[in-house]
């Protein structure tokens, strides 16, 4: 206990004329602190500090909380954070739910157990269990496994992190807007502790509270099998990762005020699968009926970056679960092949299947799926599966349907042409057997993003948007100019691994890159290099246009029928050195570090680290600052508007009005300055 705190407490007691009682309470309090300090573990001590001042009802713990901005009360106990930097406090690894292990595996998350003493919230929790990839770089302990295909992380992963800007006098602020981030990673990878998502810069520049959190991914997060049914629609939905997001929002709603945040000004933001999950919540019958329709607004704004939504049927979900189980039987030697294992499963009772799944080691499940499905991964067929279906195209306005249908046909024709031209063994060699990219794509073939159970996830979310049957909050939505290049580059002899292991290396030309990375025989190089250069850009362009049409324009069109506060963007920054300007450009995910303000040296997505140069730093920093200014305005006012006063004079960001001829804001930059303007293209 510091001197100021003692003096403050002393004053209270002297006013009452009870110095003797005061000294006794202080002695007890100091003893409690001493006992707590030797308690060990994450939760310091197991004693309650509560000593109530006789006439005021004030507790000693209240005095300590008042004097120490890092000590904060939550609904479940005290947490003690850390000084992150000169401008920011942080609380890391706070549990927002019970560990989803044992009987809680594949069930809706439950509130955490209260604790005694103080939780030292000064380090990140472990990441969700997943196959190691570039999407899950959390700390140095996992960096060597990025491209190894190893299974990393833990089932015990439901923790959150908070960054809060300091006030001038070092105290906690009050009533700040809250920015809650949902990470991407195809719902099979990712974590809240990636350096990309460190929230200090955003908290400081936007003057907001920033929250990130882990949610279950992959087999833990999305898994449905009839044998696991309990009769509870939440436990039986299969969408456990989505329910984790709801539980995290509940925690924020109930506790963020004590950290300086406004629980009635929460912006829910996400990218890629994170944005898709947010859209699943916006269209969720469960979230709408059980929360918003009852006046419990879990969030008040939404930012959707490179999103859309894809939901599989429960029939597909059961097929996926059986494939996962079959992979386990093959790994254990109980079956000689996947087909053999599926036949065995068909003869098992539901109780036998339930027992096998409940008692399975989660790491072994991941290894089984990785080893069995990875060998069958097919980059091009996977991309074909991402194309809009006829059902989805049928929801489009009649004058737009032919355009989108034609784009889908072009993409399918292009994929077919490439597959007919390239020998299968060469096409397969684009993704080497030990490639982390292959493992991830294999897992994506088995594990869906969300399952349309009709309760947590709507049977057709786009229909709910079309009919106005969704949660209406102000929305920012958009995508990157060259989304698909991210996915194409992952297939080039595991480019992610290459960029990581050669971090900082400058490659002066595309030809040198091709020479270094070429997986095919030299005699075929002229043909296949040409195919790469021509087909790469073409596939990227068509795939990106489809993504924008379905993930951004269609969603914005439906929403704008029922609300005026919809704002659309396109992110176009492409100042990487060669050959990254061609191979990646303004690709999927490259906008994320700009949102968080993590565009300095050594920060951000690994691809972006490689793209940062001293030459493009002024422009990228200016662009990031401008984007944060718009977001800050949006968090406070429900529209990004004109952030004059926050950051000089920026273009007015007008709302979306109509699919044909509507305007979106363009985010771009030269090496030296931000380039931002409204466009109808």
Image (cartoon, rainbow, N blue to C red):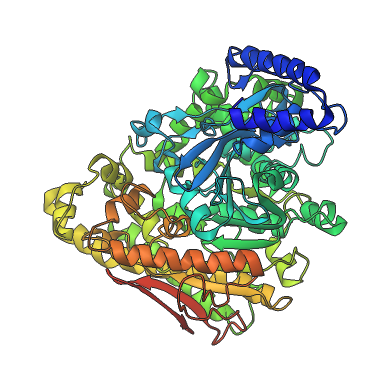
Does 655 sit left or right of 645 as displayed? right
Of 283 and 487, nearer the camera is 283
Q: Return the x and y of residue 260 as percentages of the image width and height.
A: 65, 49
Residue occupying image coordinates x 61% and y 32% = 4
Q: Is residue 449 above or below residue 109?
A: below
Q: Which quadrant holds residue 460?
A: bottom right
Of 104 and 335, nearer the camera is 104
Q: Residue furthest bottom?
A: 661
Residue occupying image coordinates x 58% and y 14% = 40
Numbered-mark total: 0
Q: Residue furthest left?
A: 523
Q: Which quadrant holds residue 433?
A: top left
Does 153 sit left or right of 300 as displayed? left
Q: Is residue 4 above or below residue 595?
A: above
Residue 264 visible? The answer is yes
Q: Which quadrant holds residue 482?
A: bottom left
Q: Return the x and y of residue 254 as percentages of the image width and height.
A: 75, 44
Q: Return the x and y of residue 191 as percentages of the image width and height.
A: 51, 40
Residue 149 visible? The answer is no
Location of the N terminus by quadrant is top right
Residue occupying image coordinates x 77% and y 32% = 12
Does 293 sit left or right of 187 as displayed? right
Q: Return the x and y of residue 633 as percentages of the image width and height.
A: 58, 68
């Amino acid at each position: 206990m510091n001197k100021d705190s003692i003096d403050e407490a002393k004053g209270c007691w002297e006013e009452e004329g009870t110095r003797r009682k005061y000294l006794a309470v202080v002695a007890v309090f100091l003893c409690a602190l001493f006992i707590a300090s030797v308690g060990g573990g994450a939760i310091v001590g197991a004693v309650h500090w509560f000593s109530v001042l006789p006439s005021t009802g004030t507790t000693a713990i209240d005095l300590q909380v008042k004097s120490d901005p890092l000590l904060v009360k939550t609904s479940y106990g005290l947490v003690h954070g850390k000084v992150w930097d000169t401008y920011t406090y942080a609380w890391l690894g706070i549990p927002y739910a019970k560990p989803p292990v044992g009987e809680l595996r594949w069930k809706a998350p439950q509130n955490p157990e209260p604790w005694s003493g103080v939780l030292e919230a000064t380090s990140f929790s472990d990441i969700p269990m997943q196959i190691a990839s570039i999407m899950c770089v959390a700390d140095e302990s996992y960096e060597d496994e990025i491209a190894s295909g190893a299974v990393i992380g833990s089932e015990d992963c439901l923790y959150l992190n908070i960054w809060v800007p300091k006030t001038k006098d070092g105290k906690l602020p009050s009533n700040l807007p809250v920015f809650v981030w949902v990470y991407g990673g195809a719902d099979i990878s990712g974590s809240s502790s990636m350096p990309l998502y460190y929230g200090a810069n955003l908290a400081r520049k936007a003057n907001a509270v920033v929250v990130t959190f882990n949610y279950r991914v992959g087999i833990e997060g999305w898994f449905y099998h009839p044998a696991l049914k309990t009769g509870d629609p939440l436990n039986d939905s299969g969408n456990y990762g989505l329910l984790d997001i709801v539980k995290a929002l509940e925690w924020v709603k109930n506790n963020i005020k004590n950290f300086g945040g406004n629980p009635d000004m929460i912006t829910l933001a996400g990218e890629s699968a994170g944005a898709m999950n947010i859209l699943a919540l916006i269209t969720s019958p469960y979230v709408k009926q059980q929360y918003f329709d009852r006046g419990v607004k879990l969030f008040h704004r939404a930012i959707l970056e490179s999103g859309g939504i894809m939901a599989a049927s429960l029939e597909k979900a059961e097929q996926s679960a059986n494939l996962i189980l079959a992979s386990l039987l093959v790994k254990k030697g109980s079956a000689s092949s996947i087909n053999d294992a599926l036949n065995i499963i068909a003869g098992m009772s539901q109780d036998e299947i339930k027992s096998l799944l409940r008692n399975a080691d989660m790491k072994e499940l991941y290894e089984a799926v990785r080893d069995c499905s990875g060998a069958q991964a097919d980059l091009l067929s996977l991309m074909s599966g991402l194309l809009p279906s006829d059902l989805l195209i049928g929801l489009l306005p009649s004058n737009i349907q032919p355009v989108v249908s034609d784009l889908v046909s072009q993409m399918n024709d292009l994929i077919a042409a490439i597959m007919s031209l390239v020998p299968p063994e060469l096409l397969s060699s684009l993704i080497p057997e030990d490639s982390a990219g292959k493992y991830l794509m294999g897992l994506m073939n088995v594990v869906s993003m969300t399952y349309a159970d009709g309760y947590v996830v709507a049977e057709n979310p786009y229909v709910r948007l079309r009919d106005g049957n969704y949660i209406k909050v102000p929305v920012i939505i958009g995508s990157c100019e060259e989304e698909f290049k991210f996915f194409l580059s992952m297939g080039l002899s595991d480019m992610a691994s290459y960029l990581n292991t050669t971090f900082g290396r400058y490659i002066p030309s595309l030809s040198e890159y091709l020479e270094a990375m070429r997986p095919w025989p030299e005699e075929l190089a002229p043909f296949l290099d040409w195919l790469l250069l021509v087909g790469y850009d073409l596939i990227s362009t068509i795939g990106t246009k489809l993504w924008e049409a379905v993930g951004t324009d269609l969603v914005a069109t439906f929403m704008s029928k029922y609300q005026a506060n919809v704002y659309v963007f396109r992110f176009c920054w492409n100042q990487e050195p060669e050959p990254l300007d061609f191979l990646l450009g303004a690709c999927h995910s490259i906008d994320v570090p700009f949102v968080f303000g993590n565009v300095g040296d050594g920060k951000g997505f690994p691809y972006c680290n490689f793209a940062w140069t001293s030459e493009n730093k002024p422009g990228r920093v200016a662009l990031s600052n401008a984007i944060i200014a718009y977001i800050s305005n949006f968090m406070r006012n429900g529209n990004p508007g004109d952030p004059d006063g926050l950051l000089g004079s920026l273009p007015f960001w007008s709302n979306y009005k109509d699919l044909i001829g509507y305007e979106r804001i363009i985010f771009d930059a030269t090496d030296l300055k931000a380039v931002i303007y409204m466009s109808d293209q």
